[in-house]
Image (spheres, rainbow, N blue to C red):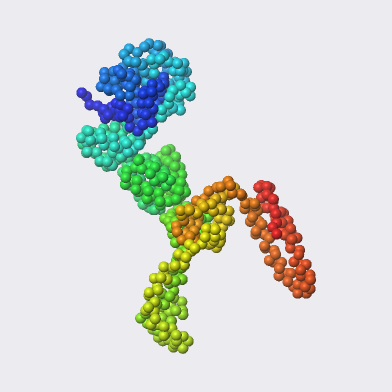
Amino acid sequence: MSYQVFARKYRPKTFADVLGQEHVVRTLRNAIAQNRLAHAYLFVGPRGTGKTSTARIFAMALNCPNGPSIEFDYNDPICKEIAEGNSLDVLEIDGASNNGVDQVRDLRESVKYAPSKCRYKIYYIDEVHMLSTAAFNALLKTLEEPPPHVKFIFATTEANKILPTIISRCQRFDLRRIPLTIIANHLLHIAKIEGVDLDEKAAFAIGKGADGGMRDAQSMLDQLVAFCGNKIREEDVLEIFGFTSVQTVSEMAYRILESSTVGALQLVHETSEAGKDLGKLLTDLIQHFRTLLVSQADPKAGAEDLEPDIAAQVIEQSQMASTEQLLRVVDGLAEVDARMRWATNKRLHFELGVIQAVQNYNEVSLSDVIEALDGGGTLPKPAARAPSTTARVPRPATVEHVSLPAVEAAPVDAPAVMPVVREPAPIEPSQAPAPVAVSRPVLPVEEVRPAPKVEAPSPKPEPKPEPELILAPEVEAAPAISEEAFWPALLEIVQERRGLIYSWVQLGTVLSIARGTVKVGFPTTEAHAKDSLNRDNQRSFLEGIATELLGSPIRFEFSLDPSLKPPAVTELHFDLGDSSPPVKPVKEAPAAAPVAKATPEPAAKSEEPAPPTSAEISEEFQNDPLIKSAVEKFKLKLAARA
């Protein structure tokens, strides 16, 4: 017998052999078991995903000797004829070469005749989207009401080119791309049967290059066996097909996330000199950053399409950057991909894209500036993404306060010098050790404070209370606060430490405190405040304060509660009402004082005109152009507070 390629030799023969299309197989099996057979089926999917194989298996299940039946013997003569494409009752038609009206008219004439051997006469039209519009229209009536002994099965890779009137008369099945893990395992299974030593990494490289098509992967394996013999490694796959290794793509992502422009350009140079396709490398790099974004949302989402070691690197890289940074990098690389398709010098555009990706990664966004202003510090860096550090900020303050006596007890060797260390700043002992202390300060210290010299030997028993002081029992005493006093205390601390978010926090209402979780509700009109506090840095800051107050790890959950009443005054009104009235009464108070000295009675009258001043202030606000535009735009009503 002549040699048969792997794609034909290992073609699925039963429903159990179809890989990666469980939803299609299950529907067809149930339809056969329940005798709910339609007259027309449409299989849609990328190349090599099993459309023709599934159609032949379905035809064998319908026309087997005991059919229609799910369990059939594919070695039966009728099934063999169908599998080989020689059956007179199962006609396979190429839609690309038989796309005219005349061919469809011949098909309509042959539909009238009954099958010769089988139960059903099945017409399988591959690449049906190649039929002309006139041919589709000629097929409409026959497709809608065919004879009872006729079944139509269509297959296409471009369903958008088929007339909607054709699709509406068929049961549509969308075949998916086969996952990388399934393809790699099936290739290893074939290699084991054929006696080929196929490396696991090489199998994953073949599956990645096949892009979800089992037939393409089997053809590539067949070509590799012809080139390498019975031993295939990943280097052979990369050399023959010009693929870029997954490790190279991951290394490129590492260098971008580490802001190593020189390292990234060097890797581009090495890849280009090796003759690899830079366009394919850019596509793989964009796909890799897409995997990082998905991993941030769900670390297990893309694990089935990755090698085990690459999956670990993806989890690590997803924690090196924020979602906004990854989105900026992906947007920049996508623009470079669009330019590279029409550019003659692809390497130049790729290098410019890598430099731009590093700049986009380090770019400071508006949200970063807001977070820095809220935090009162410098701009956040990607590496510092540990929210636990913010919760530990209050502790050093207590330790510094307690550790001051320990500094007194530390220099035990020279008791006379120890008071000199206490009186100046703590920097001076490092600058001037014992000689300076002996020459001048010893006599004045003995004259002014003789008591410390007597107590100097006492630091020896002090090491015992030291561990009790360093433990900072003051932090542990905080849990004495009740749940009713928790929220006012938290508001007070927020106003002191981070006043910019105080207006957001005070809009919240504590719904419940249970199992280490504080649920805070906001009125439905204050969604902006809820979203602003739900950012990582704000939430971790509040959780740190709550942990400090309640003495145990606390987690916040913010939500919108329709039962909560919105504030009586909007935020714009609140700011105008609070900021403007206190300004002028404070300035007018000293002016009223001299009048009170001259005549005591008019002093009381001078304090009474305060309400008119507030009216004057409101007039100033109303006449202000910005206030007028705000009132007209948002339809506000200004009211002066007493």
The answer to whether 445 is drawn above or below residue 354 in the figure is below
- Quadrant containing the N terminus is top left
Please report the residue visible at 48 percent of the width from the left and 57 percent of the height from the top: 543
The answer to whether 105 is drawn above or below residue 621 in the figure is above
- Quadrant containing the C terminus is bottom right
Q: Nearer the viewer, residue 477 or 323?
A: 477
Q: Nearer the viewer, residue 309 or 468?
A: 468
- Residue 456 in picture, x, y percent from top left: 40, 82
Q: How many callouts does the rendering have?
A: 0
Horizontal arrangement in the rendering, residue 509 relative to residue 438 (left or right): right
Please report the residue visible at 49 percent of the width from the left and 63 percent of the height from the top: 480
Horizontal arrangement in the rendering, residue 415 relative to residue 603 (left or right): left
- Residue 130 in picture, x, y percent from top left: 42, 23
The answer to whether 234 is drawn above or below residue 122 in the figure is below
- Quarter of the view holding residue 42: top left
- Residue 432 in picture, x, y percent from top left: 41, 80
- Residue 260 in picture, x, y percent from top left: 38, 53
Please report the residue visible at 56 percent of the width from the left and 47 percent of the height from the top: 561
Please report the residue visible at 40 percent of the width from the left and 84 percent of the height from the top: 416
Q: Nearer the viewer, residue 290 or 23?
A: 23
The answer to whether 593 is drawn above or below residue 532 in the figure is below
Horizontal arrangement in the rendering, residue 459 relative to residue 368 (left or right): left
Determine if residue 282 is in view: no
Determine if residue 409 is in view: yes
